[in-house]
Image (tube, rainbow, N blue to C red):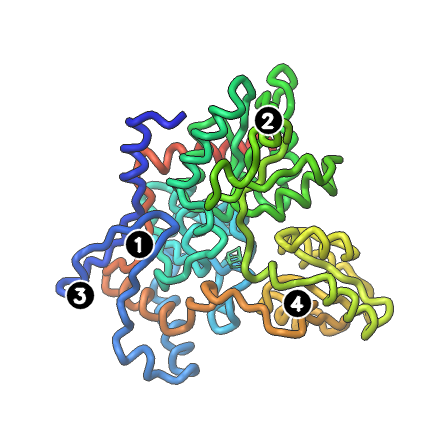
Amino acid sequence: MATLELQGELQQAFTKVHQPREGAWSGHITMAGGAQLQVPLPPRYTELTPEETALAIARAKERLGSRLVISGHHYQREEVIRWADFRGDSFKLCKDAAARPDADYIVFCGVHFMAESADILSAPHQKVILPDLHAGCSMADMADIDQVEEAWDALQEVCAGQRIIPITYMNSAANLKAFVGRNGGAVCTSSNARKIMEWALKPIDDGGAGGEKLLFFPDQHLGRNTALLEMGFKPEDCVVWNPFEDLGGQDEATLRRAPILLWKGHCSVHGTFMPIHVDNIRKRYPGIKVVVHPECIYEVVTKADAYGSTEKIKHIIEAGQPGEVFAVGTEINLVSRLAQENPDKTVVCLNPNVCVCSTMYRVDGPHLLWVLENLLEAHVVNQIVVPEPIASQAKLALQRMLDIA
Ligand code: SF4
């Protein structure tokens, strides 16, 4: 049950965004993972040609030297990721950046929740910068902290006497990770979801969290795919909590019975892949191997030959035989890059329509150049800062994951 004190803390669960340049910005405070405000770029940045932008980025990066590390998520566009010192999924990037304590600035080319996690896991002197503050994540935004607190209170009442362990996917705002941390739960990624969910339901004497049930945020599909395909649960064991309906749209008996409660959230990119796409691509390319991300719906994942995190998808294709044909169910920038980097194989997107993550796409060459040139002038723009106690509580949930997985 959330106390008044905790609710007060939650109201302060803001991410401060500093724009210290005199006259250009007076400071902006926004809910972690929520709506953002990005100042328009000075015209110079939008007037440069792509070649001029690239040249200027190269110069700025060289001048900043080891004080700068650029992290690039797999879903970033080519004009951005080519400058990344590290490429990877969100958690790998946070770990990579933390391994560079000599860097004062971590420019995180990804989305808001990733920059928050990088800030939480980085050293105190490091400043994390998101090139475009509009780069959010629709999935992370589906688990609003007020709705989460309301759901938690209702479940504590309906399921009185049952221990519920909250688990959140890495793709969530810092205030949700903090909620999970202070309520005995842990963060998970798409590669360790099974281990974390098993820990949640394992008796305390066996090193688990002793939960009778778990509440999984915000991606119902990762939670369901893991429970059904890797943990032996049945469809009726998994119940979806819809935050816009009374009692999540369920009756009390169902909530008490179900061991797996799934928050009604999804990824707008991976949700576009449908079973018909798998059927069609198999007809078009007999013998094709279909590999998808576990944020896809269960009916797609069960039709695929393999599924896994972006890192796993990458490894599967790299380990494929020359001449092999793959259909990949994930964001188009990664699919295109995999095709380019594996010229001895054929790599196509599972969905014939382009599946771009529109928020990832907001980070472009001009925004990257803008933050770098500001750094050259000792102006830190678009810094992402997760304040206390949110940062410590979120770190607790992240640390539990590291200890378990
Ligand atoms: S691909 Fe999906 S989960 Fe990833 S950042 Fe985009 S909307 Fe969020």
Left or right: 4, with 242 as reference point: left
Q: Residue at x 76, y 66 (%)?
A: 326
* Alpha carbon separation for disc pair 1 and 2: 43 Å
Q: Is residue 391 above or below residue 25?
A: above
Q: Quadrant of the C terminus?
A: top right
Residue, disc 4: 338
Q: Earlier in the sequence, mark 1 or mark 2?
A: 2
- CA gap, disc 2 to disc 4? 45 Å
Rendered residue at 54%/24% (across/down):
159
N-terminal-most mark, 1 or 4 = 4
| N-terminal label among 3 and 1 | 3
Q: Is mark 4 within 8 Å of ligand 1?
A: no
Q: Is residue 104 above or below residue 152?
A: below
Give the residue displayed 79% in from the left and 63% down from the top: 289
Q: Quadrant of the N terminus?
A: top left
Label 1 within 8 A of ligand 1 by Cβ: no
Local secondary structure at mark 2: helix
Q: Residues within 10 Å of mark 2 (few under 14, many from 20)?
A: some
Q: Amino acid at mark 1?
A: Gln
Q: Nearer the viewer, mark 2 or mark 4?
A: 2
Q: Secondary structure at mark 1?
A: strand
Which amino acid lies under the numbered mark 2 shown in the image of this protein? Answer: Arg
Whole-Å distance between the Cαs marked 3 and 4?
A: 40 Å
**Where does label 1 land, which residue?**
383
Q: Which residue is mark 2?
A: 256
Q: Position of residue 247 (x, y in %)?
A: 50, 36
Q: Secondary structure at mark 4?
A: helix
Q: CA distance from mark 1 to mark 4?
A: 31 Å
Q: CA distance from mark 3 to mark 1?
A: 15 Å
